[in-house]
Amino acid sequence: MRIGFLFNHYLSYQVLHGAPFAFELSRIRSDFQVELLFSNQNSYDEAKRIARLYPDNRCTFKLLKQNSFTRFSSTIFPDLHRPLTLFANRKLLASFRALIAPEKNYIILKALPAFRNTSFIGLRHGAGDRPVSFNKGRFKFDYLLVPGQAYFERFKDELPEGCCKIAGYPKFEVLEKLNPETTCLFNNDRPMVLYSPHFHRHQSSWKTLGSDILSFFAESDVYNLVFAPHARLFEHSIYHDNIDIEKFRKCPNILIDTGSEKSFDMSYTGAADIYLGDVSSQVYEFIYHKRRPCVFLNPNELDAAQMSFWRFGPVIEQIDSLQDAITDAEQSFEQKYRSEQDHFLELAFSLDKNPPSKRGAEAIIQFLDN
């Protein structure tokens, strides 16, 4: 049986959320031919790096076909990159008994006659609960793996009985194996704030408040700031509106990282004392190892009731409220916010004696055998 794990994104961060399932699946079932498929070299290289953590895996790796226009689209029209890659490789993709991916865009293939015998198995590449995370595209999968009980409750009634399974969060498993080295980021003992805005133009705080936030910390003699946004924010100018950040690189209390490996491996979420964000699910990774103060930015006046994790700390709409919000988050943390973080973390990530890779692989096997 041929099983394809598809990583069809121009950035590599989704590999952490899917490759461990593939490696463990190939170790458990010798009769499965498990192949990892990539639309870019960086994702291919990242998967090779992770593969070393799963000795004796039998996976094969393949770079998908890219024509010149598809490669051009990834730099100018990022939203076209994935569908163009799918179209260029549709014959290959249709040859798999199951296609598994940590994103929902490839579900468009299901409408094609060539894929009528292919099972589509969905994975998540984060732990967020923005409304878009639960849109109808998720419910077209034949089978879905989720990280915890909160997501299981959201999806279980939208899929056939038994077709939504809790597997845990494989990214944590990989990073525990890699054990990235922690380094001192600043040469002082000031509290460190991590500002991690999302890339979504109509939900992110970056376009409205980003420059003011960097200026606030540039003038501060109290805090250090790590500015490490979602990797897509600075990959394409259509997301970040060409806001100038270069002048802030000279500030001794500001570290700017728009997409290095440390943006993915939880180096910053582990080191920071305070989280400053908007709709990004990275806040769950921030509180995973240690509960800490959080502040959320809502300049676009989104419905706070739809953002469960905004209960982790104060929510503000204007830059003038930032200092008061940070003070509130720190001083009221134990009384107001720690219990909220504890509660939601238990629901977000299902912890078990078996690692997520094994739980996910066994769930996939059960589905395919049946």
Image: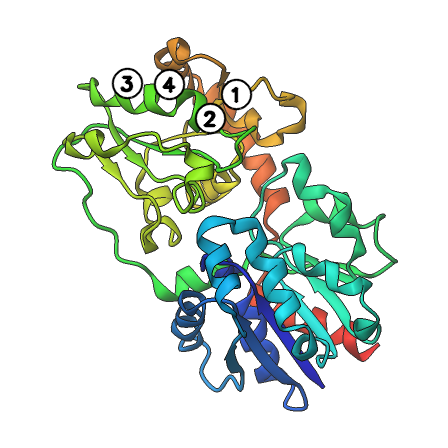
Q: How crowded is mark 2: few (under 14 residues within 10 Å), some or many (20 or more)?
A: many
Q: Say if 272 sits above or below 73 in the image.
A: above
User: Which residue lies under the disc numbered 3?
Assistant: 216
Expressed as whole percent of the image width and height from the top left, the position of residue 288 reads 47, 44
Query: Could you tell me which residue is drawn at 61 percent across and 45 percent down?
Result: 348
Residue drawn at 66 percent across, 79 percent down: 92
Secondary structure found at label 4: helix
Q: Which of marks 4 and 2 is in front?
A: 2
Dot 4 amino acid type? Ile
Q: Do the residues labelled 2 and 1 touch (CB within 8 Å)?
A: yes
Give the structural element (helix, strand or loop) at label 1: loop
Q: How crowded is mark 4: few (under 14 residues within 10 Å), some or many (20 or more)?
A: many
Marks 3 and 4 close (CB-CB < 8 Å): no
Residue 23 falls in image quadrant? bottom right
Name the N-terminal-most of marks 2 and 1: 2
Precedes in sequence: disc 2 or disc 3: 2
Between 339 and 199, the one lying in front of the other is: 199
Q: Mark 4 points at which residue?
A: 326
For the residue marked with disc 1, what is the amino acid? Asn
Quick check: 109 left or right of 73?
right
Q: Determine the CA span between mark 4 and mark 2.
A: 16 Å
Dot 3 surroundings within 10 Å: few (below 14), some, or many (20 or more)?
some
Residue for badge 1: 298
Distance (Cα) linking label 2 and label 3? 14 Å
- Which residue is denoted by mark 2 in the rendering? 205
Of marks 4 and 2, which one's residue comes earlier in the chain? Answer: 2
